[in-house]
Image (spheres, rainbow, N blue to C red):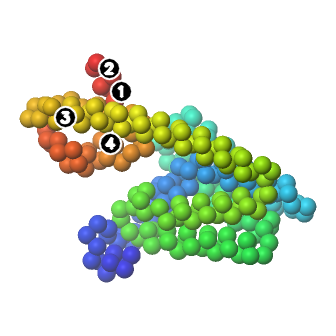
Amino acid sequence: YISVFHSKDIYAMRSFSINGMFDKIKDVIFTDLIFNNIIFNLLLSIICLFIYNKNKTKSKISIISLCIMCAFSLYLIFYKIYNLEEINLSLISYFNFIFIVMYLISFIVFITENLKGNEKVFILFLIGCICFIVGPLFVVNPVDNRCMLPPYVIMVLILVILFDNAKIKNIDQILKFSSIFISFMFLLLYGAIFRYEYIRTKYINNHKGEDLVLYGLPSDEYIFYDHMKEYLYNFKEFYNIKDDVKLVSYKEWKKMK
């Protein structure tokens, strides 16, 4: 951040446009930090339900904030299932922005109403840390997912603290089975990606000097350098592929076969 604000950073630059800052908050920061984390938001809503059910005193404002949080989590699932992100409507974009703001306010209200003592202070402190880390990104370009890594870590820490506070029965067994299932799922996923990447690299090495039509890797949203449409130059440079080589997606390659 210091090098950026002294104009010594070759990667990022400052941008003080009010409209640009608002669009960045609406379309980049909120989207990458909150809107794309469906599993995190769903887990957060479920844990808050357990915390609310555990507490003896149940205020109306806690019910309202909890309903907004659950509605937001369900909306994210609906949004992804029906591919609403492909509908390029500014109205939906503004609706998402307003919904995210309501979700964040509801979460803070829920924490202040249902947690006590050091846990409440610590979680509010962590939320402040997220704002402090993300804040300078409002005036820096470009902003992408890797800028969100520290806030992601803090968000997971908040989730762990709330897990402990919820006092869910048999939580150890649930976490063990969940960890095994998720680990096995990602092992299969990256195993398939590695297998196709190995075949593709071997194919490239055996046909050097020729014009090649390459296929993308399956589940390429889980890896960085295979996003050919967004990072075409980086992809070709990483694999030493000529600029004039035509690249097609995995689905297009399957049709060509």
Chain-order first, disc 4 or disc 1:
4
Q: Nearer the viewer, residue 238 or 108?
A: 238
- State how far apart marks 2 and 3 are (Cα): 20 Å
Residue drawn 57% across the image and 42% down it: 182
Residue designated by label 3: 204
* Circles 2 and 1: CB atoms closer than 8 Å: yes
> How would you rate the neighbour count of disc 4 (Cα within 10 Å): few for under 14, some for 14-19, many for 20 or more?
many
Residue designated by label 1: 251
> How would you rate the neighbour count of disc 3 (Cα within 10 Å): few for under 14, some for 14-19, many for 20 or more?
some
Chain-order first, disc 2 or disc 4:
4
In the picture shown, does residue 77 fall above or below 32?
A: above
Q: Residue 155, position in %: x, y?
A: 59, 62
User: Looking at the rendered structure, which numbered label has been put on residue 240?
Assistant: none
Residue designated by label 2: 255
Residue drawn 56% across the image and 73% down it: 129
Residue drawn 55% across the image and 71% down it: 131
Identify which amino acid the numbered label 3 is placed on: Ile
The quarter of the picture where residue 19 lies is bottom left
